[in-house]
Amino acid sequence: MKNFFTIIGGMGTMATESYIHQLNLRTKAHKDQDYYNYTLVNHATVPDRTAYILDHTKPDPLPELLEDFKQYATLGPDFFTLPCNTAHYFYDELAQAVDIPILHMPKETVQEIKRRYPEAKKVGLVATRGTVNDGVYDKEILAAGYELARPSEAVQALTDELIYTNIKEKDHVDGELFSRLVAQMIAETACDVVILGCTELSLAQERAPITDLPLVDSQSTLVDRTIEWAEKTQKQARKN
């Protein structure tokens, strides 16, 4: 197969399925051959990223992620996507291990704020404890000139409940809980926009969408950038 990209997913599996679903839905296709070529790695047994970030005595996900990227780089994809925000803690090591570009979901998400909320000054982040603590979004938000708002322990507890108890354990989205935690984040921090910085939260936005609050969805942004990169590489291939 030529002119394809590779998705390193499975963190978690239902969130990856949501990413694939949105990718296919947004593809302008009228026949089978109009869809993009891609390979999907659903590596569900990668050790928990948040557990390791918070406690380095826990199993380290990096060796398995490195193996995935190196193994699939041999197939020659045009680029990689990594639809797990927390796994971007390891982005630099992964990018150094292969000569193939990797879309950076947090960076693209922060750039999306400028497109959709040009007047925003203070940006809130709701995500796993790993992502909130690893600084990946902090770096991008501050570099873009925004003020950063972190969740309170109360908001983080609600976020953990939605991500782990509802979605990961039960494949269930509590729409009321989802709306409440985002509204509470805005009320407590007076932020202008909230980043959904976990793909399980993106799954919640797909199933129980919030339409009345200022959000930027990291996975939705990744879908759009994936399509842009795929279109660009296809055009380059046609020229050659």
Image (cartoon, grey):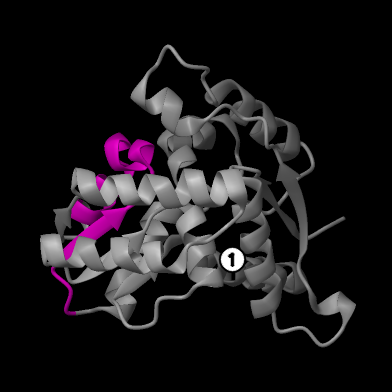
In the rendering, at what x and y percent does residue 239 appear? 73, 73
Badge 1 density bin: few <14, some 14–19, many ≥20, Cα 10 Å = some
In the rendering, at what x and y percent does residue 98 appear? 60, 35
Q: Residue at x 15, y 61 (%)?
A: 146
Left or right: 130 with respect to 240? left
Asked whether residue 143 appears in the rendered view, the answer is: yes
The single residue placed furthest to the bottom in the displayed view is 30
Q: Residue at x 46, y 49 (%)?
A: 163
Which of the pair 60/96 is nearer the observer? 60
Residue 43, by quadrant, is: top right
In the rendering, at what x and y percent does residue 127 appear? 36, 49
Which of the pair 184/126 is nearer the observer? 184
- Dot 1 falls on a residue whose secondary structure is helix
Left or right: 141 with respect to 224? left
In the rendering, at what x and y percent does residue 236 appear? 68, 69
Left or right: 96 with respect to 33? left
**Quadrant (top left/top right/bottom left/bottom right) for the N terminus:** bottom right
Residue 64, by quadrant, is: top right
Q: Residue at x 57, y 30 (%)?
A: 97
Asked whether residue 127 appears in the rendered view, the answer is: no
- On the image, numbered disc 1 is attached to which residue? 229
**Quadrant (top left/top right/bottom left/bottom right) for the C terminus:** bottom right
Q: In this figure, what is the number of numbered marks? A: 1
Identify which amino acid the numbered label 1 is placed on: Trp
Q: Is residue 194 magenta?
A: no
Q: Is residue 132 magenta?
A: yes
Q: Which residues are magenta?
A: 119-142
Which of the pair 229/109 is nearer the observer? 109
Residue 62, by quadrant, is: top right
